[in-house]
Amino acid sequence: MPRFFTAMVAAVCFAAPAQAQQEDAADLIEVLRLLDIVEIMRAEGADAAEELAEDLFPGGGRLGWAAEVARIYDVTRMKAEVEESFQETIPVDAIPGLISFFTDQVGQDFVRLEIEAREALADPDVEAAAEDAAQDAPEDLQARIDRFIEVNDLVEQNVSGTLNSNYAFFRGLADGGGPLSNLTEDQIIADVYASEPEVRDSTITWLNAYLTLAYTPMTDDDLDSYIALSESEAGQDLNRAIFAAFDTLYNDLSYELGRSAAMFMQGQDL
């Protein structure tokens, strides 16, 4: 998955610096619609948890699972965690320039198109069509998408994030007394990292499909301006803050889901 993102006149401002940073960061969160992305994540997580139940509880025993998934994917808690992490991580001096870019019409178009593409890819037919479109993307568009992926380190960040969340899930399964409870830490890590080639391939395919779907309506100049922002110090700060916020959330959710799944597999009350 991917994952993205007035200037106040310094005249008479007596608020504490930390409070001012939180307020500025909250404005940036709103402009980027990060909490809308949390809503999408919640829906994706609930769907994945239902598929997980079909694999882990093939003989039934799912009574109460939907309620447990709803508890884990509590959207209010998820939003609060993302907000807190983002506000703590984003440097205050990066915020004005980022808000300036993303409140401009081009910036707002990027935010809207990224969110719409993420929602659309929930449909397997749309995802398959987007993968085909990425294969046939015009050379200029593909070159810009490749550069955007490289500048934001999207492949490595997403592969690392996926492996870490998978580890958190298996760690939760083990801690919950599930079938992996006898595995050593080294065995869990080895099993997780054995999937790295497959995770990398699927990440590259998904990123190209997603970004092709999202960015096809934009002009070359628009994409060049977005890449330039990503290359800037503020753009790099934004990228780090977003990954930090969402990776932490993914890991927490994955661990809880694994632990709850282990208990359901044993027929325990949570």
Image: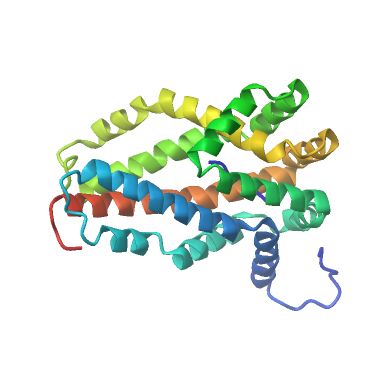
144 to the left or right of 170: right
Q: Position of residue 118 (x, y in %)?
A: 58, 45
Q: Position of residue 124 (x, y in %)?
A: 48, 38
Report the front residue among 41 and 10.
41
Residue placed farthest to the front in the image? 125
Say above or below: 198 vs 111. above
Report the front residue among 11 and 24.
24
Report the front residue among 254 and 9.
254
Quarter of image, res 168: top left
* Identity of the residue drawn at 77% across and 41% down: 226
Which of the colour schemes (rainbow, by chain, secondary structure, one colour) is used? rainbow
* Identity of the residue drawn at 32% across and 54% down: 256
Report the front residue among 35 and 17.
35
* Identity of the residue drawn at 68% across and 69% down: 23
* Identity of the residue drawn at 74% across and 21% down: 139
In the rendered image, is residue 170 in sight?
yes
260 to the left or right of 155: left
In the rendered image, is residue 3 in sight?
no
Image quadrant containing the C terminus:
bottom left
Q: Position of residue 184 (x, y in %)?
A: 20, 36
Say above or below: 129 vs 102. above
Say above or below: 236 vs 146. below
86 to the left or right of 5: left
The mark total stands at 0
Q: Position of residue 234 (x, y in %)?
A: 73, 47
